[in-house]
Amino acid sequence: LKQTLGAYTAAENSSIFFKNIVNENTTSSRQLIIHEVMGRHCGWLTAYSSYLYMKELNKKSFFPAAGLNKNKWSIHAIYIPEKEFNLEKESIRLNKIMNQYDCVNIFLSEGAGIDNIIKEKEQNGEKISKDAFGHVRLDEINPGIWYSNYFKKKLKCDKVLVQKSGYFSRSAAPNKKDIELIKKTVKLAVKSALNSNSGVVAMDEDNKNLISCIDFNRIKGGKPFNINTDWFIKILNEIGQK
């Protein structure tokens, strides 16, 4: 599948969610804000909501002389499952940002670096709970809390805020882009049902991204996000994350 129904809406609302909570960085010195975004295996939602947020931020004007520096509202790190990152090197980079702007803002995909977290917990003798499908229970591991505890010491934070946008994003009414996609999908879904054709109606990557009735045997989960996408590389360069 090229695009899942509701993905555009979720990304838009994740960016709106962060636009509101990021203002908390003015309430304390050396404040770390971690925005935990849905995404066990795929970092697209984290990446695209980051892109949408920075796109809107770049349209705004700031008054540095009054202490309103754009960098305080910027994103300083984006962590997703598909892209490896060295926590020690990131700590050094982020500490410089903290010293300069008195805050650090992170977009964290809930599945980012999960193997390292599990390994540490197992070494500490902790039991890793799994669901009926054999997936690690991320709500019990709580990646946002783990990273907040890690960076709190490394960045010498005075205050740490972890906020999850999952419920806010997935309960939102569909935006214009998703409504258009839903209408096209439903139209073919009804037609396929009337013709007794079974499958999943969606944008088919193997058919020029056209809305198609895709055979069930071709459907599987866990599709990774392409980290070489132009807009993602651009945003990483913009925030100084190599």
Image (tube, rainbow, N blue to C red):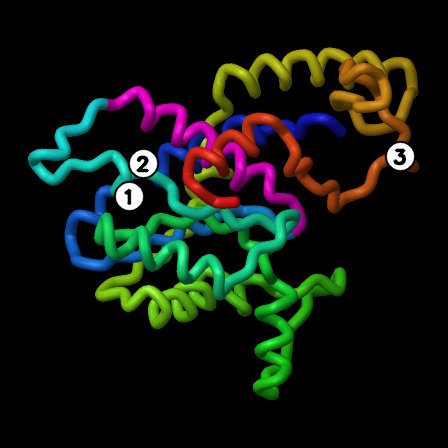
Q: Residue at x 29, y 44 (%)?
A: 21
Amino acid carrying mark 3 in the image = Arg
* 23 or 132, nearer to the observer: 23
Image mark count: 3
Pinpoint residue 118: horizontal percent, then vertical percent: 62, 72
**Residue denoted by label 3:** 218
Residue 90 can be seen in this image: yes
Q: Main secondary structure of the magenta part?
A: helix
Residues at badges 2 and 1 in contact (C-beta under 8 Å)? yes
Quarter of the rendering containing residue 160: bottom left
The residue under label 2 is which amino acid type?
A: Lys
x 59%, y 60%: residue: 113
Q: Are marks 3 and 1 in contact (CB under 8 Å)?
A: no
Q: Position of residue 166 (x, y in %)?
A: 48, 46
Q: In the image, is residue 232 part of the stretch drawn in magenta?
A: no
Instruction: Please tell me whether residue 102 is drawn above or below residue 8 in the rendered image.
Output: below
Q: Which residue is mark 1?
A: 22
Among numbered discs 3 and 1, the one appearing first in the sequence: 1
* Magenta span of residues: 41-60
